[in-house]
Image (cartoon, rainbow, N blue to C red):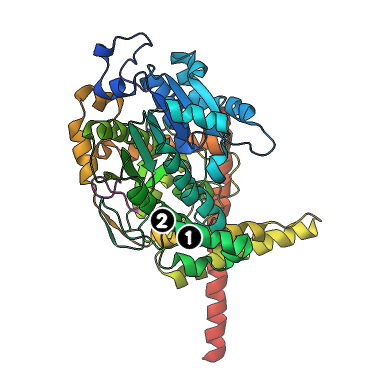
Amino acid sequence: MTISGEEMATSAINNIHEENNTYNFPENNTPVENLTPIQSFYNDQVLFITGGTGFMGKIMLDKLLRSCPGIKTIYLLIRTKKGKNVEQRLNELFNDSIFDLMKKQVPDFKDKIQIISGDCSLLNLGIQPEDRKKVVENTNVIFHCAATVRFDEKLPLAVAINVRGTKELIDMAHDMKNLKVFVHVSTAYSNSNLPEIEETFYKPGMPAENLIKLIECTGDKLGEEIAPKVIGTWPNTYTFTKAVAEDLVKRNGKSLPMVLFRPAIVIGTSKEPVSGWIDNLYGPTGIVVGVGAGIIRCLHADPETVSDLVPVDLVVNAVLATGWKRSQMGDIQDVPIYNYVSSHRNPINYGRFMELNMKYGRQVPSIKSVWCYTITLTKYRFVYELLAFFLHTLPAILVDMGLFVMRKKPKALKIYKTISKFNDVLGYFSIRQWNFHDDNVVDLWKSISEKDKEIFQFDITKLDWDVFFKNNIDGLRLYMFKDDPSTLPEARKRMRKIEFAHVFIKYAVLGLVLYCLYQAFSLLF
């Protein structure tokens, strides 16, 4: 059946803007006895959230404000950025369309938000004494989501945010007399130097205190130079510093009601508050956008390797559930750990991942694409380098020559150097397989009430990847490419012309190669 451009555009709009919830959220005055166990735990509580302006933080704020309207206060740590003060950044945060449904359901949401000006890269989190006193005296629940998630982040900054920031927050938590739960969000790849990762702690590259002192003594420049030796067998500064931070949680958080949550590769929303929302180009999302734009045409990835993807709304639901679960455990010696992954119970490999994205991407191409959808995956580095030369570097040289002739600034080669670096960073993860254990997550799911399973759904086995990637492509077109749905018919027509040109060039090049080979053999024989 052929779908018209108008129908497809309407479908995209509906996917993004429909209210996906099959349940009614409680009103602010709902009696406590009518709340679910998880809702009851967060009712009348004061929360302190770091990383609330980030990708996962936005979904967490939306979910908390919609599903737990009885929350008393949310202290939101925000730093000044790019000349904007914390008030401006808060207004920008809630101007994001991801909060449209929340604003409709909770119109007085701002009454619950209190800004705490600070910065996780600074000593004492950059929090002023009066704000610190307020947070320490009133906080019941901490969600520590702040981190620099760039794989190639410079070591000094990664240490400042991911390690020292965690230490500063744990130190502050020790002064909180009313603290009930402290959830530290890490990553499933914090110990990616190991092939098998259980829900337990592992030895870090070095103790946090030693690492912090090392960076303080060496300074930023020397710290960058010694980074390869410091991180050792870890693939990058991100995973290394997250592993060191986990050791802080183990050692310094023993007397605190802590829980460690490790999500795998966090991607766009599956359902809440809308399907297909995404606001960044990290990891696999960057690949899909690059392929959709017609810029990335080959990838160093094993088609059979499982890409451990987890939608952000399911991640947030699981995080909130772990907070409730930890509150039920009382005083325990060990910090419980939850590996939230998909590879064990609902795996999807890179081959299938690209197949689904290509399938739906071709149905709704971007009006901004410079070439058609085409991608070749290979697990062999040499083959990838060869393909990258012919499919990336050579076309970039030709484009830059054309720009030079037209007296325009060449930029194609620069773009592909960035893509090559991006591919190098991801290559470690796209050709390797890990065996993650997630028994604690399974037990957590079994332990929550049936009503909470509706509201805080995080059972990864219920996720239909085919449906997810259809909605994901619609979301990428709207949120990342910023294409108006009305441009879809024109984009499809334009893409058909590009595909014709692609086929013509491919066979022309093949013919030229065969002709050259024929001439070479004729001279030899």
Q: Is residue 157 above or below residue 139?
A: below
Q: Residue at x 58, y 27 (%)?
A: 90
Whether residue 393 appears in this view of the structure is yes
Looking at the image, tell me whether mark 1 or mark 2 is earlier in sequence order: 1
Q: Considering depth in this image, is 452 or 506 the residue closer to the camera?
A: 452
Give the labeled residue for mark 2: 244
Q: Disc 2 marks which amino acid?
A: Val
- Find the distance from the CA under tag 1 to the CA under tag 2: 9 Å
Magenta extent: 340-349
Q: Main secondary structure of the magenta part?
A: loop
Q: Residue furthest right?
A: 407
Where in the figure is residue 227, as x and y percent of width and height? 52, 65
Q: Residue at x 22, y 43 (%)?
A: 440
Whether residue 13 appears in this view of the structure is no
Q: Are marks 1 and 2 in contact (CB under 8 Å)?
A: yes
Give the labeled residue for mark 1: 211
Quadrant (top left, top right, bottom left, bottom right) of the N terminus: top left
Where in the figure is residue 366, as x and y percent of width and height? 55, 39
Q: Residue at x 52, y 32 (%)?
A: 132
